């Protein structure tokens, strides 16, 4: 069977170049006589892999020297607790901008550890927009939390909030490495790798050094940023194979021209799909234009019957994981870095054909 076009919101597709390289090295990584899956995380061979992955991430993202890069486990969900445990003092407060389900979950989790202010929310319109203008941090806030891309509803921050001396904390799970960003604007970034960077099981954390060592006394060792930083992500056995795949993904991104080139391709892909949605009488985009995501594009059809019919046709033709989240319904095309423009063009062709055959049902 030929490979499908996988529009999953995560875990997402990986490029064929990365998968082929991993397949070639499965039994013997660079003459070591062993697979990365079975080698010691304390070995010189793996040390070369993890340091290489960090070096590439720093280079491609422009991460300043005064930031630590960590490869952790537990996904963004664990970071929902880890961030306040490390940054929110006893009796302290933090600001959370609520722009989607995951932003709300992050705020809910942080409420276990202190006062959470939600100075802005887009819940009133089913999270279909980013609040503007964004409020400044409240006095005394330990940090200011945003979710830079909202996977379910298809919105993204096109402008970052001005937070002054208050550290800006960002869940960047679904748009990390999709476009250039000024890392110095952030105090802490965390991101599950399973969208743009690799397989599920690795979480990237980028934390400014002056924020280390602020954890609460009872914070478990495994949830302390400073311990992982001191041990170079090797405090315990890390997700070794996932880190190896991340290194391959980063090598692939570098070979394609780095983030500036990837960003141009991502804009091209998104524009192809949004241009169709904006002229379609059957398929309707749900996010407000000014805040549209480049990674996740939801849309709806007039009826559940039409939605089901399209999903059936799409699946039969090799377009998978297009069903929208229950909060929005309809369809959702997640077009992360590894999705080639060809996949988006063919999806639009299918949508155009479906619309031509069902135009009267959209009236």
Image (spheres, helix red, strand yellow):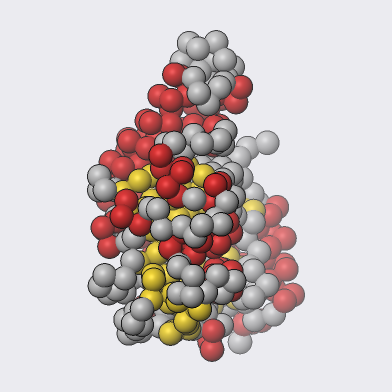
- Name the spot of residue 128 as percent of width and height, x first: 50, 80
**Is 286 rendered above or below residue 33?**
below
Residue 211 x, y percent position in the rendering: 35, 57
* Location of residue 291 in the rendering, given as x and y in whole percent from the top left corner: 40, 75
277 or 245, nearer to the observer: 245
Of the 4 image quadrants, the one containing the N terminus is top right
Residue at the spot 57% in from the left edge and 51% down from the top edge? 220
Give the camera-side residue of 285 and 41: 41
Residue at 39 percent across and 70 percent down: it is 143
Mark yes or no: residue 54 visible: yes
Q: Is residue 9 above or below residue 122?
A: above
Residue 126: name its quadrant: bottom right
Q: How many numbered circles are shown?
A: 0
Q: Residue at x 51, y 44 (%)?
A: 72
Query: Is residue 335 visible from the viewing direction of this image?
Result: no
Residue 80 horizontal/vertical position (percent):
54, 62
Q: Nearer the viewer, residue 94 or 193?
A: 94
Outermost residue on the front side: it is 217
State which quarter of the image contains the C terminus: bottom right
């Amino acid at each position: 069977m030929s490979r499908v076009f996988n529009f999953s919101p995560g875990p997402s597709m990986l490029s064929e170049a990365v998968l082929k390289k991993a397949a070639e090295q499965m039994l013997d990584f660079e003459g070591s006589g062993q697979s990365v899956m079975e080698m010691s995380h304390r070995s010189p061979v793996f040390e070369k892999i993890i340091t290489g992955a960090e070096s590439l991430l720093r280079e491609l993202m422009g991460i300043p020297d005064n930031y630590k890069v960590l490869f952790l486990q537990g996904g963004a969900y664990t970071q929902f607790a880890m961030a306040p445990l490390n940054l929110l003092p006893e009796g302290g407060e933090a600001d959370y901008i609520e722009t989607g389900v995951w932003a709300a979950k992050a705020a809910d989790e942080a409420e276990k550890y202190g006062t959470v202010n939600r100075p802005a929310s887009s819940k009133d319109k089913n999270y279909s927009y980013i609040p503007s203008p964004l409020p400044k941090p409240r006095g005394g806030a330990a940090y200011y939390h945003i979710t830079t891309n909202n996977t379910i509803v298809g919105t993204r921050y096109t402008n970052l909030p001005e937070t002054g001396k208050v550290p800006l904390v960002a869940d960047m799970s679904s748009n990390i490495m999709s476009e250039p960003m000024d890392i110095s604007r952030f105090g802490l970034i965390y991101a599950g790798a399973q969208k743009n960077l690799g397989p599920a099981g690795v979480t990237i954390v980028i934390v400014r050094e002056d924020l280390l060592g602020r954890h609460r006394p009872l914070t478990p060792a495994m949830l302390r940023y400073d311990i992982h930083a001191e041990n170079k992500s090797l405090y315990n056995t890390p997700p070794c194979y996932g880190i190896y795949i991340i290194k391959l993904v980063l090598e692939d991104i570098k070979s394609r021209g780095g983030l500036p080139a990837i960003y141009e391709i991502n804009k091209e892909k998104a524009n192809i799909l949004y241009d169709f949605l904006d002229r379609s009488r059957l398929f309707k985009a749900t996010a407000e234009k000014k805040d549209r995501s480049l990674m996740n594009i939801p849309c709806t059809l007039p009826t559940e019957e039409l939605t089901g019919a399209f999903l059936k046709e799409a699946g039969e033709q090799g377009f998978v994981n297009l069903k929208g989240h229950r909060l929005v319904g309809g369809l959702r095309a997640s077009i992360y870095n590894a999705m080639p423009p060809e996949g988006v063009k063919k999806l639009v062709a299918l949508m155009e054909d479906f619309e031509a055959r069902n135009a009267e049902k959209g009236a």
